[in-house]
Image: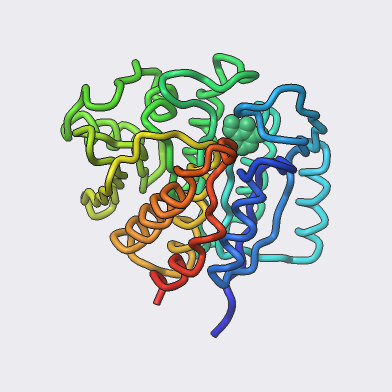
């Protein structure tokens, strides 16, 4: 069978396990060829470290795009994560326009905020630019903060909302232009956490919940998005893909919780065998 090919566009945080250093091993382990466009090189990620270095690679993006176009390269999936500036959002939008085909898919993780707060370094109008990028995607995976900010709405903390709020939020995200929005970090009760997708063409909601482990690690969103994007690229249904990605993310967190030295990321490597089992 023909091997699927994906390109992921996000930064390289050299130490710390997030973005490309998660996406590349996870997607490769799933049997998908994984090309990359690094948007910046940082010595570490920005969560819990100080003094990190930052080398911007924005100018490389159109050069790589033009070279790949001249080679007539094609991708079954385009997956974007952390993007550092409004200029990068525009260049990545151009990349979508150049490499979109009738049957490939575009998956945007609008990494920019959590717990009601925009990450450091992003201007207040960044969510507006990210919403424009999301309008070009087939799938988007905002957490509840990112969803609210892209819609210009107030953030609702966990357990202060109900199913009708989540469904309304998903319909409003669809109205931005993405037919299959998926919201993450949904918590109706403190013991359970999960994700809810809206498949607007079928007017159907699909959800998957697991235990809520009350810890927070940098990079878990990237573990979830990489495995979800990989599962969808391989052709799994949304029902099955959500289960694959949530179970893998929860297993990665469970591997890590007893180790106080591992504050910077999750041990997703140890549970790759479990991920591969779930694909059978
Ligand atoms: O995990 C998302 C991510 C990726 N890359 C960098 C980040 C973050 C989240 O803060 O800072 C550099």
Left or right for 76, reference 154: right
User: In the shown orientation, is residue 23 left or right of residue 184?
Assistant: right
x and y percentages locating residue 212 in the rendered image: 30, 40
Q: Residue at 49% of width from left, 47% of height from top?
A: 256
Q: Quadrant of residue 62?
A: top right
Q: Which quadrant would residue 186 be assigned to in this image? A: top left
Quadrant of ligand 1 in image? top right
In the rendering, at what x and y percent does residue 25 appear?
Answer: 62, 60
170 left or right, relative to 263: left
Q: Quadrant of residue 151?
A: top left
Could you tell me which residue is drawn at 52 percent across and 43 percent down? 259
Q: Is residue 142 above or below residue 252?
A: above
Give the total number of marks visible in the rendering.
Answer: 0
Q: Quadrant of the C terminus?
A: bottom left
Residue 89 visible to an observer of this rendering: no
In depth, the one of 198 and 136 nearer the eye is: 198
Q: Residue at x 30, y 47 (%)?
A: 197
Residue 223 in sight here: yes
Q: Quadrant of the image for the N terminus?
A: bottom right
At x 61% / y 20%, what residue is drawn?
Answer: 122
Check the image and report above or below for 186 versus 23: above
Q: In this orientation, which residue lies closer to the viewer: 8 or 271?
A: 271
């Amino acid at each position: 069978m023909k091997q699927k090919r994906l390109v992921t566009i996000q930064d390289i945080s050299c130490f710390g396990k997030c973005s490309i250093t998660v996406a590349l091993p996870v997607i490769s382990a799933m049997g998908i060829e994984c090309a990359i466009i690094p948007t910046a090189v940082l010595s570490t990620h920005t969560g819990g470290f100080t003094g990190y270095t930052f080398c911007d690679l924005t100018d490389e993006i159109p050069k790589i795009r033009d070279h790949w176009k001249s080679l007539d390269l094609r991708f079954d999936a385009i997956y974007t994560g952390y993007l550092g500036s409004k200029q990068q959002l525009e260049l990545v939008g151009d990349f979508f326009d150049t490499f979109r085909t009738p049957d490939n898919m575009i998956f945007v993780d609008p990494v920019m905020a959590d717990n009601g707060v925009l990450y450091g370094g992003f201007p207040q109008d960044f969510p507006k630019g990210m919403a424009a990028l999301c309008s070009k995607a087939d799938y988007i995976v905002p957490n509840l903060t990112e969803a609210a900010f892209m819609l210009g709405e107030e953030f609702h903390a966990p357990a202060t909302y109900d199913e009708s709020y989540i469904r309304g939020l998903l319909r409003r995200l669809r109205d931005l232009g993405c037919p299959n929005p998926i919201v993450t970090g949904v918590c109706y009760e403190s013991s359970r956490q999960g994700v809810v997708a809206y498949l607007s063409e079928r007017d159907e909601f699909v959800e998957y919940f697991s235990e809520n482990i009350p810890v927070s690690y940098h990079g878990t969103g990237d573990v979830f998005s990489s495995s979800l994007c990989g599962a969808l690229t391989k052709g799994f249904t949304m029902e099955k893909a959500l289960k694959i990605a949530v179970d893998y993310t929860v297993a990665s967190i469970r591997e890590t919780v007893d180790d106080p030295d591992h504050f910077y990321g999750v041990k997703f490597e140890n549970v790759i065998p479990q991920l591969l089992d779930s694909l059978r």
